[in-house]
Image (cartoon, rainbow, N blue to C red):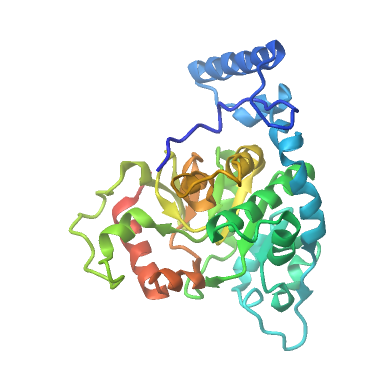
Amino acid sequence: MAELESPETYGSVAGGSNGAPSSSIGGRFRRDVAAVLLTAAMLSGVYFSSGTFLDLLGLRRSSISNNQFAWNRECVAKSLRNGTLAGGDAVQPIVGFPGDFVEVFSKAPRIYILCVECDTVVVPRAWENNHALLDGKAFDECQGTLDLVHGLRVSQMHAAVLADALERNFEFVAIMEEDIRPDFNVKWGPEAIGELMDALKTRPWSTVRFGFRPFFIERSNRASDAKPLLNPPVPAGSCPDARCVCQQLAGVACQMAATGCDMRSSDAYFIHARYFDFLSKRLLDYDRATIVPEQYGKHIIDLDGFAALPNQILAVPQWTYQKGGSVDGTNLGMQKADSETFIKQCVTTM
């Protein structure tokens, strides 16, 4: 994977058309002040969100607001739409979620659903006032990005709704892809939902990922013909990658403090406002005319995108899976087996 930069240290971006980092004395001074304040807070043992300092110093909104991303706004506006509300006997993939899943996602100020076959998407009535569909076909046509590889196109859709969320000043948002499949055997209930929401109010966090693919485990569980192998002989509690150790928060979630874990899938997640700008910038900051395959990973949401974020919360056991995973030889049974291996080897108690 490419070398990861920290979302806590990036600075403002100049308003010029090339989007180059600012070299102004004022910009450097604000970043220096932010660094001093953050260091002082750490040394004093007091937790302050870096997002708070970015807000105070006027740095958070900088990069998406400059001309480098201006093309994105118009296409987002043209591509956002409402879904069909559930009613009568309507049965569609999005509607087919457990009630407690619908309730958890109702907590988000906005639910963005990324879709290609958007006319078939029917959303629960509980999401009537806080959902929006991003039409992938309309978005790609508007941007002229139909020639990009799939991973980059999908990642630009994620970046687009993050830009929209930033403009609307949401505290956090939910994002899901249309090809997700819920696990109806996972039960939360009011107590578990309350525990998660309390954790989001009291702990630093970047994302809550309801579905995930521990690729560092998949690699060891797959042969070249994509058939499952026996789980690797790693004892319980011995995580194959120390960056992927996940500390149990409550009965339904754990938190990875470190960055760099190769944890794939972007099918359903919450993301906090302090990371809207950083992640969107990371996904969009390349020249479409000159990018080469070796550089793709840095700009794909579930490769170096998510891997750069600290303090990610994972639902354990996971709640959603990717139906589209079958295209790479990973069926639902394989995904569940890999997830169970991850929980056994990498989730630790407090």
**Badge count:** 0
In which quadrant of the rendered view does residue 177 lie? Answer: bottom right
Which residue is painted at 65% across and 16% down in the image?
A: 23
Q: Residue furthest left?
A: 233
Left or right for 215, reference 24 = left
Left or right for 222, reference 292 = left
In which quadrant of the rendered view does residue 21 lie? Answer: top right
Left or right for 259, reference 238 = right
Q: Position of residue 32 (x, y in %)?
A: 60, 13
Q: Position of residue 135 (x, y in %)?
A: 72, 65
Q: Residue furthest front?
A: 289
Q: Tell which of 161 and 252 is nearer to you.
A: 161
Q: Tell which of 316 and 293 is nearer to you.
A: 293
Q: Position of residue 277 (x, y in %)?
A: 66, 38
Tell me if residue 111 comes above or below residue 61 in the rendering. below
Which residue is painted at 40% across and 43% down in the image?
A: 1
Q: Position of residue 68 (x, y in %)?
A: 71, 37
Which residue is painted at 57% across and 13% down in the image?
A: 36
Left or right for 345, reference 137 = left
Work out which quarter of the rendered image holds the C terminus and state it: top left
Tell me if residue 168 comes above or below residue 153 in the rendering. above
Q: Tell which of 78 and 178 is nearer to you.
A: 78
In which quadrant of the rendered view does residue 339 lie? Answer: bottom left
Which residue is painted at 60% across and 62% down in the image?
A: 190
